[in-house]
Amino acid sequence: MSGAAAWRRRATTRLVHRAWRRVQNAGAVTAERPGLLSFGRIGWGTRLAFPQGTVFGEPWIHLGACCIIGEQVTLTVGLAPADLDYGPDPVIRIGDGVVIGRDSHVVAMAPITIGDKVYCGPNVYVTSTNHSYQDPDQAIGEQWPSSAPVEIGSGSWLGVDSVVLPGARLGRNVVVAAGSVVRGEVPDHAVVAGAPARIVRRWAADTGWQPPLRTPAPTPDPAGVPPEQRLDLPGLETPAGA
């Protein structure tokens, strides 16, 4: 390849990348630029990356402040777009500072509440509705699904490919290991793993972590670094009155 041809190819690649970056910025959804999405609430500093996944039932979806919603994340109230009234209260309520990794799904018919500062890895699936199979003579996909509220406590971490099923109630600062399937109640400060997920480690004030942690504690933050320099969204200034 001649030098001129190589230069043109590099220049073309740079132009494509710059153009795509502009498209991503223009297509991102924020409170100031909601596009065609009419969320019941979207807090200051929250950003839905472009391209978005499937989103419908937005009037019953409330997003807190400073959330990061990755590319191709599905947020739906109901199983299909329909002219239905789900009542005066939000069905999906996401707290402040929540991170939802790309290709994740939050699908609700019963309420789903995600607390503040919950972090979800890629391809996490949270749902308050599930297939029913009570009738052995009817196709499972044609039976009316069952639903139950879901709660995920503040400060929790959901690993990649994890699934949270209807009726699950996770306490504060719960760790869900990658690939786990969670149902039922999980207490505060617990680590769960497996399918179905089981508690593999817990913390208590009198005993600490049991079984004891096998990895050393991470290096603490450098002394003298102000909190604003450790924010997920550095450089943002809170608008007056926010």
Image: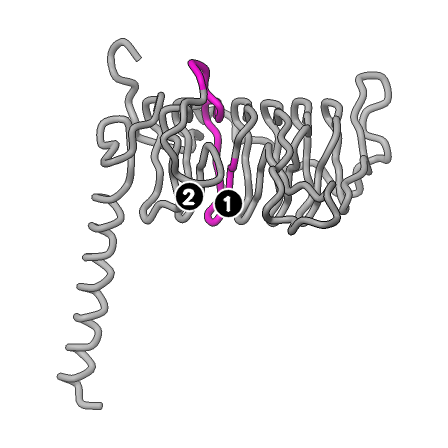
91 on left or right of 42:
right
Q: Which residue is mark 1?
A: 104
Query: Which quadrant is the N terminus positioned in?
Result: bottom left
Whole-percent x, y for residue 51 in the image:
33, 49
Q: Find disc 2 in the rendering and name its residue.
A: 70
Pointer 2 and pointer 1: residues touching (CB < 8 Å)?
yes
- Residue most extreme to the top: 241
**Residue 50 is covered by the magenta coloring:** no
Q: Residues within 10 Å of mark 2 (few under 14, many from 20)?
A: many
Residue 58 - label: none
| Residue 175 occupies quadrant | top right
Q: Residue at the spot x=23%, y=36% of the render? A: 35
Q: Is residue 33 visible?
A: yes
Say which of 8 and 27 sits in front. Answer: 27
Earlier residue among tags 2 and 1: 2
Q: Is residue 49 left or right of residue 167?
A: left
| Residue 96 location (% of width, % of height) | 45, 23
Question: At label 1, which amino acid type do we have?
Answer: Ser
The residue nearer to you, when weighing 184 against 117, is: 184
- Counting from the top left corner in percent of width and height, residue 46 is at 35, 29
Q: Nearer the viewer, mark 2 or mark 1?
A: 1
Residues rendered magenta in the picture: 87-107
91 drawn magenta: yes
- Label 1's element? loop
- Dominant SS of magenta comes to loop
Residue at position x 17%, y 70% from top? Answer: 11
